[in-house]
Image (spheres, grey):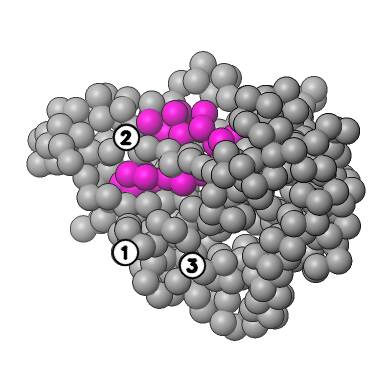
Amino acid sequence: MSFKQLVFSGVQPTGNLHLGNYLGAITKFVALQETHDCIYCVVDMHAITVWQDPAELTRNTREVTAAFIAAGIDPKKHIVFNQSQVTAHAELAWVFNCVARIGWLNRMTQFKEKAGKDRENASVGLYVYPSLMAADILAYRATHVPVGEDQKQHLELSRDIAQKFNNDFGDAIRAHGFGDAFFPLPEPIIQGPATRVMSLRDGSKKMSKSEPSDYSRINLTDDADAIAQKIRKAKTDPEPLPSDLKGLEPRPEADNLVGIFAALDNKTKADVLRDFGGAQFSGFKSALVDLAVAKLGPIGAEMKKLVQDHAYIDSVLADGAQRAAAIAEPNMNAVKDIVGFVRRK
Ligand code: AMP
């Protein structure tokens, strides 16, 4: 069975949107608008799997929405909304909790990392986070999911859930006229030179919203001075830049900065090394500062402006939610019929 191509992705409103989110995810969201119908979701229900201050959650939800728009996502041509406004996410997540196996969830590395040593004290929501993520995507029967490298395992789980649902309910799916499969197996889109942007302080750690040192990341709201300072202070090694990719392999910090440069300039890492191979880091960092300020400065400024306008942002989310629900609700009704739930008609 073939499914109409549809893009879905989500970003958590957990503060400190950074260069990793931008290069790993948001730039891809922007590009895909040219070729696909796209649904971009601020996943507030995922955010509360770890404690969020309520006022901050509201603020961060508006900030991610502002970032989407400032980066170039068109909320009229495509759909931008926050997850909690469309009830199908929670409803389908419950069905998927009953399809997914405990053994599958036990393998999720993000849960292990986020729960840390005190696993008994993690929320139940954090454990079933991947079922909700599968529900996000599959409530729309979306086929393509742009994400950073860290989400690959969750996407594989989404495929496993879709596949098991299609198998377990195969007879009902056919009986209700949906062919052999109700859900597509969603494909991750993880491409380009910056699918895993690393900390500026430690090339072995992912750039992350929750890292205590602000020098580890470039925030989308950083001004030109902050961007310059952080790049100048970024950890490097004493050697000049290599002239080929092989030379980057044992040098994670150099590899990271070259990847960031390439992604910001729409080039490959090999292109960047052609221009900067043999250069000292000081010169390369100056060029990177100029590039980063030129690309991120206007987005940060626009974001700060948009986020003030609560009425506008909230109207974007409400309009998006309404259009999202119009797609998800019929799918959810079909799921209810397939599973055998009696429903109001
Ligand atoms: P999150 O902030 O966890 O909601 O992530 C939102 C999106 O940004 C997801 O697609 C992540 O894979 C992506 N992302 C987060 N951190 C990074 C990073 N350091 N490098 C590349 N992509 C990232």
Label 3 vs label 2: CA separation? 25 Å
Question: Of 281 and 103, which appears nearest the observer?
Answer: 281
Numbered-mark total = 3
Write the residue at 57% across / 76% down: 313
Point out which mark residue 73 bears. Answer: 3
Which mark's residue is nearer the viewer, 1 or 3?
3
Label 1 vs label 2: CA separation? 22 Å
Dividing the picture into quadrants, the one containing residue 157 is top left
Write the residue at 86% across / 39% down: 235
| Relative horizontal placement of residue 17, taking residue 314 as reference (left or right) | right
Disc 2 marks which amino acid? Answer: Leu
Point out which mark residue 185 bears. Answer: 2
Disc 3 marks which amino acid? Answer: Ile
The x and y percentages for residue 214 are: 86, 51
Residue identified by numbered label 1:
326
Magenta-drawn segment: 136-159
Res. 15 visible in picture: no
Res. 319 visible in picture: yes
Is residue 71 within the magenta segment?
no
